[in-house]
Structure formats: C-alpha cells, structure tokens
C-alpha cells in the first residue's frame, strides 16, 4: 500500500519518539551483567551487605539472592516451612506471630514473585514479596498474597525463613509492595480488573488520557487493608517508603508523576517526572530513584510484550528525586538516558558500590552499569 508523504512523516516522528524498540542480543556472561534470569522485574539490596534479592519469573527460582561481589546465587523456592521452624539468634530472637495476617492459610502452594521490599522491623530483617500465582488449567485460581520472610545474613549467604502471609483482597490488583519499619505494608493498586472487553478498552483509554485508574493501599495487622487517601494516579506502579520513614512514594505510570505522602500528616505532593515511571528505589539520604520508559505512553513498549521479543529494549531514563523537605522545592535530575539498544528496558535501578543494577520485566539479566557522577549511594 502506498503511503502519503504526511503518513511517512508521522511514522518517522513516531520512530524518533520510540527510539530503538525491539529484541536485544542475549546476555553475555563476559559482559559483567548477571545472566540466566527471567523477567527480573524488581530488586532490592539487603542493608549492610553485597547481596540483593531478585524477583524472577523462573518457576524453579522465583526469588534469588545474588552477591554483587562474588556473583554467587541462592534460590528461594516453595514449599516453605512453618514459622516455628525458624532459627533463634540475633536476627530472630523468637519466632514471630505478628509478621503476617491472622487469616493466612499457611505456606503458599505456589510462589511466583513480583514486587519486593526489605526493611529492619525491630530486631529482624524482614522481606516482603508479592506472590501472584500463575493460573493453571487443573486447579482453581489462587488469590494473590504477600509472603513475609525473615532474612538471616550471618552465615555467609542469606537464608529466608517464611513467617506468614497477608492475603490480598480480590478487589485489588497490586503491582508492587513496600515495607515500613513499624510493620505497615503498602501496595500499589494498578486498576480495577475489567469484567468485559468493553471495560478493558475503557481502562486503556483512561491510561491514554492520563486519567486515574488506581491508588496506594496499606495493611496494618490491627486494622487490615485500607486506601491511602489522595494517591489516585493513572496505573499505580512502583511504591516505596523513604529510608527515614517519613514519606511514601507512589509512581503513576501514565500520570508521569510521583505522589509523595507524608506518613505522619497524611498530606500529599505530586512531582512531574521526565518518563512514565515504573519502580521506585528508596535511598539512604531520603531521596528516591525512578526508572521509566521515554517512548510513547501506553503504546511505547508494546513491541516488547510478545514472549518471543524478550530480551527486549526500549528507551528509558533513570531519575533522581529529592523530595524537598522543610518547605524546599523538590528536585528531579536525570542520571541516565538510554536509547533502548543493548540493555533490556529497565524497570528498576538500585545503586551499590559505584554501580547501578538494573532489573527488567522484559529481560534475561540484571544489567550492571557504572553509576554516573553524583549518584547517591544505596
């Protein structure tokens, strides 16, 4: 079919906006990247160590601890033992009975790791992982839940001891989770699940228009689940609690913005971002890193969605957000811009030892790049 000059100009404009989108070369073990992973969507470093946890789409290793220095790996797989089997010691003075919900049915029959976070809660290093079991033809669908682990880092390699779970209400479609030092767990409700093709089309149109479809939710053992007020965004995605415990950060992907919630006062601020944000990483100085794609919103990563397109790259950037406490204006600075070649499009970035570790929902690796000058430490 012949194209008019106007149509050709439109296509060229779209190509410029999208940059390079498509399959990138498979991971090369000699590159310094950490290969052999499947859709490593979220990563978090264990404080005071070189180890980080990776949520991985592999059924044989849904959660993996990786040593950034030695590159050793420890996989965490179901089935898990009951909390009473966890060891005692400095990391776990007593088996906890308050780490999860009282209505947790026990260890999960399936473990499919999504968003994760780690925080010291009392004397315990605690890890929370969103568990989104895969549907199977032979069994009824398993509801989403958040698995709660104690992590023991004293023996040279991390050990994760399952403590309990927090069932996720069917009304919520969570993308990511965050943990606070008081045990509060937060989640990002992306959108209400559509019941028909017409509802799905309406939700997509709201994304195209940047209209709110989701919000942040919180769980406390004494109160259960509730909505976090004034956090409505278009496709709630990454979520994080600042390291000083003062702020909750909620990424609105198709809002192109970060919502900051004062956890004590409940007030909120919205900060425009230079990309459509995915995951958020909390840093030691109270600031945040945001990763997001810089192509056309909503449709910009469509070429990466087919399974045979992975590993897939698309233009993305990494931004540093300084919240601006005490009346100061927030600051946003782009640290990295990438055109989508060579590196699978990033969904998360975590700094450690002068490098940035990049996870990707569309990748087969954790990519490792030098951190630009001025990158805050983890």
Image: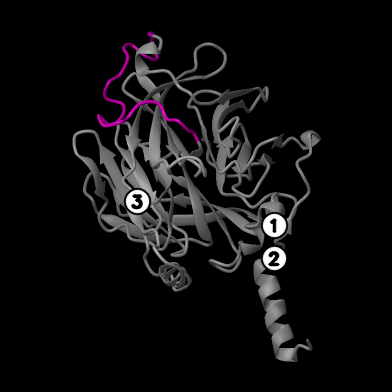
Front residue of 167 and 238: 167
State how far apart marks 3 and 1 are (Cα): 32 Å
Q: Secondary structure at mark 3?
A: loop
Q: Quadrant of the N terminus?
A: bottom right
Q: Secondary structure at mark 1?
A: loop
Quarter of the rendering containing residue 185 = top left
- Label drawn at residue 340: 1
Task: Report the predominant secondary structure element of the magenta stretch.
Answer: loop
Residue 72 at x, y percent in the picture: 66, 22
How packed mark 3 is, by other alpha carbons closer than 10 Å (few <14, some 14-19, many 20 or more), is: some
Residue 120 at x, y percent in the picture: 38, 26
Marks 3 & 2, CB-CB < 8 Å contact = no
How packed mark 1 is, by other alpha carbons closer than 10 Å (few <14, some 14-19, many 20 or more), is: many
Q: What residue do we see at 59% from left, 30% from top?
A: 61
Is residue 243 in the magenta section?
no
Front residue of 89 and 321: 89
How packed mark 2 is, by other alpha carbons closer than 10 Å (few <14, some 14-19, many 20 or more), is: many
Marks 1 & 2, CB-CB < 8 Å contact = yes
Front residue of 56 and 377: 56
What residue span does the magenta drawing correspond to?
88-111
Examine the rendering and report whether any part of residue 16 can be seen.
yes
* Mark toward the viewer: 3 or 1: 3
* Mark toward the viewer: 3 or 2: 3
């Amino acid at each position: 079919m012949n194209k008019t000059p106007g149509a050709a100009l439109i296509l060229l404009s779209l190509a410029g906006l999208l940059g390079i989108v498509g399959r990138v070369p498979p991971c090369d073990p000699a590159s310094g990247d950490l290969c052999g992973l499947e859709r490593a969507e979220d990563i978090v470093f264990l404080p005071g160590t070189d180890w980080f946890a990776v949520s991985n789409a592999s059924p044989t290793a849904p959660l993996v601890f990786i040593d950034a220095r030695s590159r050793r790996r420890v996989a965490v797989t179901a089935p898990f033992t009951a909390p009473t089997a966890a060891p005692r010691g400095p990391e776990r003075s007593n088996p906890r009975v308050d780490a999860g919900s009282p209505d947790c049915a026990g260890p999960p029959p399936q473990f499919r790791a999504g968003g994760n976070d780690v925080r010291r809660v009392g004397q315990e290093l605690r890890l929370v992982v969103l568990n989104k079991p895969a549907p199977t033809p032979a069994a009824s669908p398993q509801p989403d839940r958040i698995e709660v682990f104690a992590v023991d880092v004293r023996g040279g390699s991390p050990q994760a001891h399952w403590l309990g779970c927090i069932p996720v209400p069917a009304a919520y479609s969570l993308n990511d989770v965050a943990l606070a030092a008081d045990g509060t767990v937060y989640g990002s409700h992306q959108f209400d699940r559509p019941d028909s093709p017409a509802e799905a089309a309406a939700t997509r149109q709201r994304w195209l228009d940047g209209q709110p479809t989701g919000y942040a939710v919180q769980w406390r053992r004494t109160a259960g689940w509730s909505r976090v007020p004034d956090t409505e965004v278009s496709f709630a995605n990454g979520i994080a609690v600042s390291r000083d415990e003062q702020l909750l950060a909620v990424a609105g992907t198709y809002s192109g913005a970060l919502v900051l919630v004062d956890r004590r006062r409940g007030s909120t601020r919205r900060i425009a971002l230079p990309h459509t944000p995915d995951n958020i990483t909390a840093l030691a100085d109270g600031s945040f890193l945001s990763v997001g794609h810089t192509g056309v919103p909503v449709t910009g990563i469509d070429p990466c969605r087919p399974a045979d397109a992975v590993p897939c790259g698309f233009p993305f950037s990494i931004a540093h957000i300084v919240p601006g406490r005490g009346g100061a204006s927030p600051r946003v600075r782009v640290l990295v811009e990438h055109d989508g070649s060579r590196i699978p499009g990033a969904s998360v970035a975590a700094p450690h030892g002068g490098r940035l570790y990049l996870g990707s929902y569309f990748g087969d690796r954790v990519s490792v790049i030098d951190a630009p000058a001025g990158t805050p430490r983890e």
